[in-house]
Amino acid sequence: MISLESSPEAFSIAVDGRRILSHSRRLPCVELGRSEGLPKAPRGRGGPRRRRAAALRLKAFKVVESAPDYVAIDFAGKLRMAFRLKEGRLRISFSRCDAETNLFRLRLAAWPGERLYGCGERGRPRSSGLDLKGELVPLWVRDSGELGEDSGWLRSRARAERFPVPAFLSSLGYWCAVDTSAYVRFDFRRKSATLIEAWALPREIVLGFAPDAPSLLSDMSSVLGRQAEPPSWCFDGACVGLEGGQAEVERQVELLLEAGVKLSSIWLKDWCGRRAPATGLPPDWRRDESLYPGLPELAARWRGRGLRLIGSVGPVLPAGGKLYAEASAAGACVKDERGRDRLLGAGASSAALVDLSGEAGSAWMKGLISRELLGSGMAGWEADYGEQLPLDAVLASGEEAARAHNRWPVLWARVNREAIEEAGRSGEAFFFLRSGWLGSTRQARGFCSGERSLGFSRLDGLSSLVPAALSLGLSGIGFWQAEAGGCLEAGKGRRGAALRGRLEAERLWRWMELSAFSPFFRLGVALGPGEGWGPDAESLSLLARMSEVFAALKPYHIAAVAEYEAEGLPPMRHPWLHYGSDPAVQTIAYQYLYGRDLMVAPALGPEASSARARAKRLTELYLPEDDWVHLWTSRSFRGGPVTVESPPGCPAVFYRAASGFAPLFDTLRRTVRRQS
């Protein structure tokens, strides 16, 4: 029930005794403003910068309507705020706003001591773990690469990167989501208030309530949308990135199979030609007949052996390619203010962007996917470059590009989903994206980490993956995968040579260990004759072991993703969801529960472990109060700080003794090949 307490000078709103917001003339709950337009983004770069804004604090108000499930308040004719209680959730909507208003602020109630989680992908967490309380969190879809490099104020301050989500959970039993595609900023620095700022009037702000953490996340994900379960072949083994042409790739596949590697699919990294080193763009998103003269036949032959073919595609078209000329003639590209195709900087060249906001662009892009990817026999692909919309673009929909920018990955995901559905391949084909926003989970089955930097860095290396996965999981994202190996472009000189040495090899091993306990095992480094990792005997042996572990866990993978689809609990989940009463659990950032029953603490390298642990290949972790069994030795543990040996091939993994999958875990320990 909505409770309204009001006087001529103030009012407060509560739901079932929980205060939501308070308003007074001295401290208004809402502000509206106008500010200078967003800066133009030169050569496709740029993000929102600090704007000079004149915000009006709306002090005068009038209660228009008050009922147990509905309250409407008018702020001097400038804004009408409606509170509607429906299915146990409070929905706050807004109307009567000046059309020129482009700045909105709302002050919600908060409490000292609460912990806040979510907001999508995160950078390096603080010492308090993933708790956002005390932080200023700007949310803007961005890429650190050449095409989408941000400039100005936001670049040094953004916490979320390719996949921000304007939603958060509270340890006090509520969640909040802001339905807008504009730039959003959450200010969690105050003890008794959470400030929401958006550079457009939100369509709606939704708050939900639940008595415990699993129910809270389940309720939030049911509203924001959950990903559909991926095809079961994804769990048959590793997806390995190969390149070098058809003969070389076929040779590498045989080498992998002979080494005992369990394969589900082959990610053909150069199916459309060699990528430009600066931007990662191919010459065109078309089959390279010189490298792969019989790609459909190769895909059919591999399918007969239980292997699928994976590719990649993006809505960014190199300006010198045939596809750009075709798309431009069809009027399928975003325009500039003069009606010409808006070209992005792409290294020394340029590229156009397909206009996903209009029917012409969407239809053209779906035709490309159907012809070039599905027509080549591919069962999946990485849908890349979904964050590249420049802020000065002119769109077919008529929408301002600055307000469409965050929603662009959602439109890109929808185009890919519809292409698969229209081809009748929904049950078998899937795609995964590097970027997203609110609503992406309704469109895409999978998401991935994208390239990470060399080394174990907590900022953008191997050690950043677990916090990213946990934060995304607490934002409602389920089927997420790390691209094992990260970005392996070798550096020059002595430093580059060192990175290709033992440290790089061990980093790759540790990355494969993490991937074995995730919903999709994808090895991103090339095995071919390029600059990536080469298939040395030791690494091949470890890949064989970890791919066998991953494949042996197939029944557990299926159960974990099914639980997410049914209840909204992600496969890679924060222990807080099940052990919230344990204070030590709340600060965890570098270990995770995989499903309900596996506790995984990957060996994340020099920056995530003590000197003693590094020297002896030990992993230090925390086990919540429960009965745990070490996966590799069957030793029993009850809880508390634990240190175990973690040589390559044996990451620190424990299972709950009471798990229904305990026989599977025990069989895995006894039957999987040992690391040589």
Image (cartoon, rainbow, N blue to C red):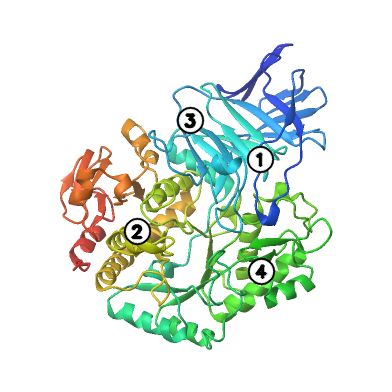
Earlier-in-chain disc, 4 versus 3: 3
Earlier-in-chain disc, 2 versus 4: 4
Residue 582 seen by the camera = no
In terms of depth relative to the viewer, which is nearer, 396 or 607? Answer: 607
In terms of depth relative to the viewer, which is nearer, 524 or 566? Answer: 524
Quarter occupied by residue 100: top right
Earlier-in-chain disc, 2 versus 3: 3
Residue picked out by circle 4: 317
Disc number for residue 511: 2
**C-alpha separation, residue under disc 2 versus residue under disc 1:** 36 Å
Relative height, residue 409 to residue 331 (above, below)? above
The location of residue 295, given as percent across then percent down, is: 52, 84
Disc number for residue 49: 1
The location of residue 237, given as percent across then percent down, is: 36, 69
- What secondary structure is found at the residue carrying circle 3? loop
Earlier-in-chain disc, 2 versus 1: 1
**C-alpha separation, residue under disc 3 versus residue under disc 1:** 24 Å
Earlier-in-chain disc, 4 versus 1: 1
Q: In this rendering, which labeled residue sits more in front, label 2 or label 3? A: 2
Question: How many numbered circles does the render carry?
Answer: 4
Relative height, residue 129 to residue 482 (above, below)? above
Relative placement, left or right, of 511 versus 345 is left
